[in-house]
Image (tube, rainbow, N blue to C red):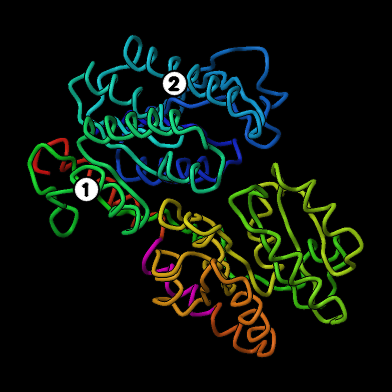
Amino acid sequence: MRVLAICPHFRPDTAPTGRVMSRLTDELLALGVDVDIVTTLPWYREHRVEDEWRGALVRREVHGALGITRFHPFPARKQNLAARALGFAAFTAEAAAWAVVRGGRPDVVFAMSPPLTLGVAGWMAARRWGAPLVFNIQDIFPDAAVASGAITDPRVVRALSALELATYRRSDAVTVLSEDLAVNVRAKLDPKEGIGRRGRPARPDRPLVEVIPNFADVTAITPGRRDTAYRREHDLGDRTVVMYAGNVGWSQPLGLVIDAARRHRHDDTVVFVINGNGGARAELEHEAAGLPNLRFVDFQPQARLAEVLASADLHLVLLRSGLASASVPSKLYSILAAGRPVLASVDPRTEVERVLDDSGGGVAVDSAHPMAFHDALDTLLADRGALQVMGDLGRDFVEHWASPRVVAERYLALFSRVRSGSR
């Protein structure tokens, strides 16, 4: 089988979706699948093309059964929405042109969103070659952008929603990370008739909606010792480390971490860490000025991910109200793979809460009630032994439910189904 995959990031780019696509590709190659990747030149970390990749608008690599075509992403800062939209549109045009004109015939086209526009490129390639389209949704767009306040113009929302629905309808299958996201997509596809059980469409002209979670790399990420070089570098000592690691943006209510540090500023056994970069960081650092028990640490290389995760005794997963039904943080599975417990502030009865309840790997509280977060944090810090038990349970859960090989096998089974037409 030959799969043409159109995605926004691929190794060595450091974006979470790039790590997902890179490892999924490795597993598909191991299962005997030929994969042709259309992606961008690496740019995510600094929001500019990395120095060693400059000097060309397109680069092509072939590594056995893996082909990689990289185009210039025309990157812009997240705060500049207009420039980012133009960059996404330009990359989409590049990807579509190559897939239609110069790509070979695939058996399946696999397109990843966001950006939503890559669904258009995927549809054009699928139509050109007479292949089925599988549209992968990491975050439901524009829902996530609207809920976070990034997009407020109703005309823009209507236009993006129309593009979203049109792309779903032109896909043979839509894959999502959780049942919450599946319900969202199914309701948009057929709000009156509904969708049958187990993701089967109520009518044959509707795409299949399949839940396939992102994986945790249980080989590269394993439970490690607390005494890490990372702890020594940032003067964390042997204190209990409560860490948020990820994007420091507007979708994450990181004021909770600052408030928690203030509440515990006289407890010299606890220290808080915000590890990452993003548009909200400067404002947060200003707000946290003078707090001796809060550290801001820059985004770390992928090679140090396991070490960073091992350095914390408790990890935080934070999403503003209204976002958990449109987005599932992929880092949740990595934290559990590291054998560390999670305290999540998310919408109730959504995927993060279900995973933590099913695994025993942590506690979820309602993001609409900040005091619930602080009460849960106090309870967890009062019983440090329980943190180790939760970490062990979380590790056991991801080993059996979300390993890379299991996830790749589910994708391959889906590709085979849509290829044969037996949706």
Task: Name the kind of residue labelled 2 in the image.
Answer: Thr
Q: Position of residue 268 (x, y in %)?
A: 87, 80
Label 1 sits on a secondary structure element that is helix
Q: Residue at x 27, y 30 (%)?
A: 166
- Residue 378, quarter of picture: bottom right
Magenta range is 392-402
Instruction: Give the residue at mark 1.
Output: 413
Using the image as rendered, state which of residue 306 and residue 292 is in the foreground: 292
Using the image as rendered, state which of residue 333 and residue 115 is in the foreground: 115
Q: Position of residue 188 (x, y in %)?
A: 26, 44
The residue lying furthest to the front in this view is 154
Identify the main secondary structure in magenta.
helix
Task: Tell me the crowding category of disc 1: few under 14, some 14 to 19, or many 20 or more residues within 10 angstroms, Cα based.
Answer: few
Q: Is residue 281 left or right of residue 159?
A: right
Q: Position of residue 59 (x, y in %)?
A: 54, 17
Label 2 sits on a secondary structure element that is helix
Using the image as rendered, state which of residue 57 and residue 370 is in the foreground: 370
The dot on residue 92 is 2
